[in-house]
Image (spheres, rainbow, N blue to C red):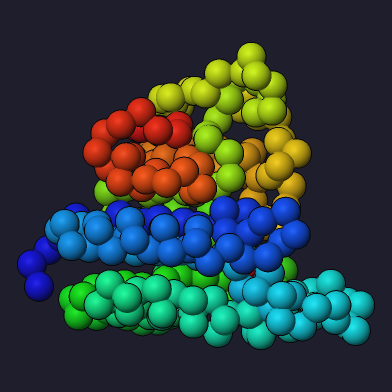
């Protein structure tokens, strides 16, 4: 397969869940449709998807284990196959294959795990299989934990030499005020050395099940952009968000070097 341009798309838990923390199939379907479109149009998409913990909660309901880190391990290990069943089925409808690549932060340090991971991504990509990364929440605790899947997505983008990283959340991007304030404006373009942290006001809507908030997204987006990876923070619930971004339409907040 000839070398295609690579784009990493990160889907946060808040994108795929409703107010009752249930996974919304139509949202995943819409995102997979766009990712399949990229694949068909000479772009190699690599996904990073959260959702295992919330999917596990959906299956198990309340869990008798009180220790939060063990609860997270239990929910994620139960929910991960459910997430992959969603993705398997949705990609299959487009005649595409996908694969799961789980990792902890340690796997990105120089050494064998990093090399193995590169071989795995390159192998999947050369076979035309869409990799879907997630943190290995079953063993990723304390030192080996990513700050959130946004950090994982940026590390994957660097690892596979993606030119673009799209971080999808449930708000439209970075605003110059509180995102719920109707006078706040969406900031369209941020340079990686620009001081825009003062604008971060956590949206109420964003305080869901996922770990990363806007403060963390901003830090990660600026850092990725400083390494030459054009990065977007945008609303994953908008119908054509991924395609519009790659079409050069004014969607979300764009971060450049
Ligand atoms: N890895 C977690 C999951 O699949 C999500 C981590 C995050 O929220 O960034 O549920």
The percent position of residue 221, horizontal first and vertical second, equals: 47, 41
Residue 89 in view of the camera: yes
Q: Residue at x 55, y 84 (%)?
A: 81
Q: On the rendered structure, is 218 left or right of 70?
A: left
Whether 24 is drawn above or below 180: the answer is: below
Give the quadrant of the C terminus. Answer: top left
Among all residues in the image, which is located at the extreme left?
Answer: 2
Q: Is residue 10 above or below residue 144?
A: above
Number of numbered discs overlaid on the protein picture: 0
Q: Residue at x 52, y 70 (%)?
A: 134
Judge whether 226 appears above or below 197 on screen.
Answer: below
* View quadrant of ligand 1: bottom right
Residue drawn 30% across and 46% down?
243
**Along the viewing direction, whichever of 121 and 55 lies nearer the viewer:** 55
Q: List x then y, in percent, for residue 241.
A: 39, 44
Place of residue 60 in the rendered image (x, y in percent of width and height, measured from the top left): 77, 83
Figure quadrant of the N terminus: bottom left
Name, please, the residue furthest toward the top.
183
Query: Residue 136, position in %: x, y?
Result: 58, 77
Q: 249 or 6, which lies in front? A: 249
Q: Quadrant of residue 144 in the image?
A: bottom right
| Left or right of 164 in this view: 177 | right
- Residue drawn where x is 41% and y is 79% of the image: 89
Where on the picture, by quarter, is residue 215? top right
**Vertical comparison of 70 with 240: above or below:** below
Residue 121 seen in the current view: no
- Please tell me which residue lies in front, 144 or 76: 76
């Amino acid at each position: 397969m000839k070398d295609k341009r690579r784009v990493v798309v990160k889907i946060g838990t808040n994108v795929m869940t409703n107010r009752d923390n249930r996974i919304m199939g139509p949202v995943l379907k819409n995102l997979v449709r766009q990712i399949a479109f990229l694949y068909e149009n000479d772009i190699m998409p690599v996904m990073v998807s959260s959702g295992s913990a919330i999917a596990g909660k959906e299956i198990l309901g309340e869990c008798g284990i009180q220790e939060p880190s063990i609860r997270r391990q239990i929910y994620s290990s139960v929910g991960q196959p459910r997430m992959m069943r969603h993705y398997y089925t949705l990609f299959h409808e487009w005649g595409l294959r996908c694969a799961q690549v789980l990792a902890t932060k340690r796997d990105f340090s120089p050494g064998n795990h990093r090399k193995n991971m590169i071989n795995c991504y390159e192998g999947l990509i050369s076979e035309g299989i869409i990799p879907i990364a997630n943190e290995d929440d079953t063993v990723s605790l304390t030192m080996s934990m990513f700050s959130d899947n946004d950090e994982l997505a940026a590390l994957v983008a660097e690892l596979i030499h993606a030119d673009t990283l799209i971080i999808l959340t449930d708000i439209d991007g970075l605003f110059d005020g509180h995102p719920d304030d109707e006078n706040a404006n969406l900031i369209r373009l941020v340079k990686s050395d620009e001081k825009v942290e003062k604008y971060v006001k956590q949206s109420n809507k964003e305080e869901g099940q996922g770990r990363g908030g806007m403060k963390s997204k901003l830090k990660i987006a600026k850092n990725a952009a400083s390494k030459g990876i054009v990065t977007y923070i945008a609303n994953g619930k908008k119908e054509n968000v991924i395609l519009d971004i790659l079409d050069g339409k004014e969607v979300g907040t764009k971060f450049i070097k």
